[in-house]
Amino acid sequence: NKGDNVITLLPGDMPFSGAFDVLEITPPVLEFFVDALSSGKSLVTPVLRDALPRGLRLSEIQATPHSVLLSGPESIVSQLSSVNATVAMPPDISTKTLITQARIITPPGVQAQPAEVSVNLTIKGSRKVLNVQTPIKIQGTLPENSSIDPEVVRVQLDVPLAWTLDGEELRELSATVKVNEKMNESVDLPVRISIPDGGKVISVTPAKATLTIL
């Protein structure tokens, strides 16, 4: 029957041959809930999984289709007037209009058809933040038996929206440390960042590289 059900287990209900005697049943009572299967349409609410990069804001977000068909237990499906579609933002936003796929999030036992929807996002803002890794270049001649650590730094940049990680602009980005072959002791050297016009350096990690004399 639909709803809460209780079944009492008796020794005679056990499917054993006469060679066995049932001494105890634990638990002696089973309680379970029976629900009817149901289906119905539910509106899709697209939501961003992560915050937008600094300097950008979401002007519009819309899912296509606007609704999906849910199938599952009636007690759950009947309560779902809307379901979320989680949108994962690409790591490098280079346009003001994005179209991406988002998966419908449903409770256990409930399926959505379709399971994914297309989401159209309109991004406002003229600049964004990019995180770039770049190798350290040596300016000058290293002393004999010496090394620089680390070899790579992480640079956070404030750049125009149109710039991309693999674009022409960032090919001119460089990180350098200045050395002299006459240096005779280990020392921390500042990392200098060169970036094309239009970009700004927010942070460099680490800000210094260590020259170690071996």
Image: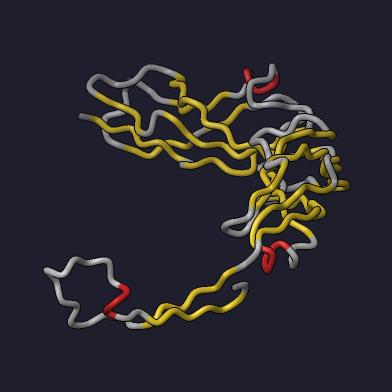
- Give the quadrant of the C terminus: top left
- Give the quadrant of the N terminus: bottom right
Would you place residue 157 above or below residue 78 in this image? Answer: above
| Closer to the camera in the image, 200 or 156 | 156
Instruction: Give how far across and how far down residue 134 sits, in percent.
Output: 51, 27
Which residue: 78% across, 33% down? 99
| Closer to the camera in the image, 90 or 197 | 90
Which residue: 70% across, 24% down? 196
Which residue: 78% across, 55% down? 40
Q: In this figure, which colouring scheme has been used for the structure?
A: secondary structure
**Residue 78 vs residue 193: left or right?**
right
Instruction: Give how far across and how far down residue 18 sits, in percent.
Output: 16, 70
Which residue: 46% across, 28% down? 177
| Closer to the camera in the image, 56 or 207 | 56
The number of numbered badges drawn on the structure is: 0
Instruction: Give how far across and how far down residue 208 sits, in percent.
Output: 44, 39
Residue 185 falls in which quadrant of the image? top left
Residue 163 falls in which quadrant of the image? top right
Instruction: Give how far across and how far down residue 184 sits, in percent.
Output: 26, 30
**Residue 51 vs residue 182: left or right?**
right
Q: Residue furthest left?
A: 19
**Residue 214 vs residue 65: left or right?**
left
Q: Residue furthest front?
A: 18
Would you place residue 111 above or below residue 167 in this image? Answer: below
